[in-house]
Image (cartoon, rainbow, N blue to C red):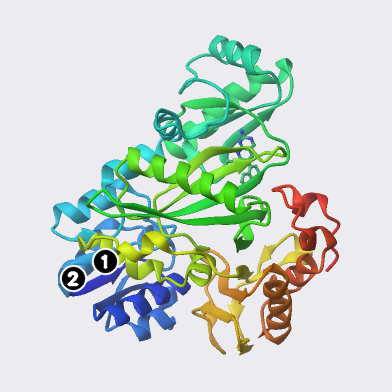
């Protein structure tokens, strides 16, 4: 097992990783920017190294600074968390070449899954259902026209280097295709340094359903059911739950089986997620594979009674996935609300600054993952997530009632938060009925 892990991240996920390390008897090194010097991850780690100024380009994204911090402290592994460098194959390679284990899949897998067209083709070859569309990259406008003649409108143009909703164009008629093709390529070239695009049939009201996977370095892969992540705004998830209200056991078996086939195809060797899009006829299709631990991993942890971060670390150290994990069954229902320092009544304007008072909820079935404390100052440089509130119940109704109770107990003063929005969503008839889609938030008339 590793002796000392450097956590190349901040905020709640840095704390989450420190907790896993403590239980595994592994020493921890926090890195922090000047803006984060009073952050909890700095205090809870065994050691801490300042890696630069507030803007993440000069601190949490600086590979030389991170590697120096790992070398100075003699860390034998790096955990990248989510965001920042977590899906950067170059960083993973640099770590390995310096003799530092990168806690994640092999750099080759990160590169392959980062190319969305390649990932899709790989999944198709593995027999995972994929969305009808182009055969890989579309190299010219005339090729794009040929594809849409075959599949029909509407279509979506996606950047192969994109993901998470960046560099996409929905096209509803022939007259829009030329402009969408060129503007998507220009945008992708500027944003990712790779202008290549591919084309798919566009689904109007899909659900976003993703499957949690663990693969080890010995070829074993286990699947830990699905998460429903349809409640999102501008590609930022707000609420996630497991299981999905749209998935019964026979559908779950199919999702798990497809995800395992996909992961085995690439010899996936870490914690990872396969995202599926589910249409109104409850057909599911591969969308993307995420090669990191995700923000919403706790809902899977609650229903499967497992510590995914500890498993991810053990896998990176070469351990085999425990046999018993293959037979885990989910229990009850878990929901996560992301509490962001944003004002939902002002277009979700970020609300950094001092938290003047804080009370976090507790009691049966309530978990709060947060780095915030009373008098903590939320810096303006990073994402606005200040807490994840997770409730677990025997069924969806109990998890929802528990969440509403916990949201009522939650007091955050000094900054605006998404707490009122969560209350409104959880009280909404359509949310209660489980009839969700990625269009929920724009179509529902939510009053705060
Ligand atoms: C789609 C789609 C509809 N049809 N692809 C958005 C993020 C990226 N992962 C892919 N995305 C989508 N791809 C086809 N063929 C709709 C979306 C989409 C979406 C997906 C998941 C969660 C929220 C979303 C919000 C808008 C669009």
Where is residue 381? Give x, y as percent: 51, 65
Question: Which circle's residue, 1 or 2, is located before the other in the chain?
Answer: 2
Residue sitting nearer the eye, 210 or 234: 210
The residue positioned 61% from the left and 61% from the top of the image is: 240
Residue that mark 2 sits on? 1
Secondary structure at badge 2 equals: loop
Residue 52 visible in image: no
Between the C-alphas of marks 1 and 2, the distance is 7 Å
Number of callouts in the render?
A: 2
Where is residue 104? Give x, y as percent: 31, 56
In this picture, residue 186 sits left or right of residue 335? left
Where is residue 437? Give x, y as percent: 72, 48
The residue positioned 28% from the left and 52% from the top of the image is: 91
Residue 238 visible in image: yes
Quadrant where the N terminus sits is: bottom left
Residue sitting nearer the eye, 131 or 200: 131
Which class describes the residues within 10 Å of circle 1: few (<14), some (14-19), or many (20+)?
Answer: some
Residue sitting nearer the eye, 385 or 245: 245
Which class describes the residues within 10 Å of circle 2: few (<14), some (14-19), or many (20+)?
Answer: some
Residue that mark 1 sits on? 314
For residue 354, above or below residue 17: below
Q: In the drawing, what numbered circle is on residue 31?
A: none
The residue positioned 40% from the left and 71% from the top of the image is: 307
Whether label 1 touches label 2, CB < 8 Å: yes
For residue 133, above or below residue 448: above
In this picture, residue 294 sits left or right of residue 243? left
């Amino acid at each position: 097992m590793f002796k000392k892990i450097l956590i190349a991240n901040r905020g709640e996920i840095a704390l989450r990783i420190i907790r896993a390390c403590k239980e595994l008897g592994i020493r921890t090194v926090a890195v922090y920017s000047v803006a984060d010097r009073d952050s909890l991850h700095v205090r809870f780690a065994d050691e801490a190294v300042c890696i630069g100024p507030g803007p993440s380009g000069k601190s949490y994204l600086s590979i030389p600074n991170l590697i120096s911090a790992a070398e100075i402290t003699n860390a034998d592994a790096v955990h990248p968390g989510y965001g920042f460098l977590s899906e950067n194959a170059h960083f993973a390679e640099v770590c390995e070449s310096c003799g530092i284990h990168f806690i994640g899949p092999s750099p080759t897998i990160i590169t392959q899954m980062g190319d969305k067209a390649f990932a899709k083709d790989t999944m198709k070859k593995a027999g995972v259902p994929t969305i009808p569309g182009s055969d890989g990259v579309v190299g010219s406008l005339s090729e794009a026209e040929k594809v849409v003649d075959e599949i029909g409108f509407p279509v979506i143009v996606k950047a192969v280097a994109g993901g998470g909703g960046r560099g996409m164009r929905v096209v509803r008629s022939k007259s829009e295709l030329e402009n969408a093709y060129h503007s998507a390529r220009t945008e992708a070239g500027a944003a990712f340094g790779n202008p290549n695009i591919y084309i798919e049939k566009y689904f109007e009201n899909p659900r976003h359903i993703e499957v949690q996977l663990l693969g080890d370095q010995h070829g074993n892969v286990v699947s830990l059911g699905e998460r429903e992540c349809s409640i999102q705004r501008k590609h930022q998830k707000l609420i996630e739950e497991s299981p999905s209200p749209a998935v019964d056991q026979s559908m779950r078996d199919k999702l798990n089986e497809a995800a395992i086939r996909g992961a085995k195809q690439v010899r996936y060797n870490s914690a990872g997620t396969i995202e599926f899009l589910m249409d109104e006829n409850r057909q599911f299709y591969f969308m993307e594979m995420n090669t990191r631990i995700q923000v919403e991993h706790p809902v899977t942890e609650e229903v499967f009674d497992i510590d995914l971060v500890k498993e991810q670390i053990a896998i990176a150290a070469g351990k085999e996935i425990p046999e018993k994990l293959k037979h885990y069954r989910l229990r009850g229902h878990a929901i996560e609300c992301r509490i962001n320092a944003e004002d939902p009544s002002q277009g979700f304007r970020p609300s950094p600054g001092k938290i003047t008072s804080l009370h976090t909820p507790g009691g049966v079935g309530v978990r709060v993952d947060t780095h915030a404390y009373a008098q903590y100052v939320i810096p303006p440089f990073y994402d606005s997530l200040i807490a994840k509130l997770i409730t677990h119940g025997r069924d969806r109704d109990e998890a929802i009632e528990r969440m509403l109770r916990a949201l009522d107990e939650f007091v955050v003063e000094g900054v605006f938060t998404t707490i009122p929005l969560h209350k409104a969503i959880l009280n909404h008839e359509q949310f209660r009925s489980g009839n969700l889609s990625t269009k929920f938030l724009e179509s529902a008339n939510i009053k705060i």
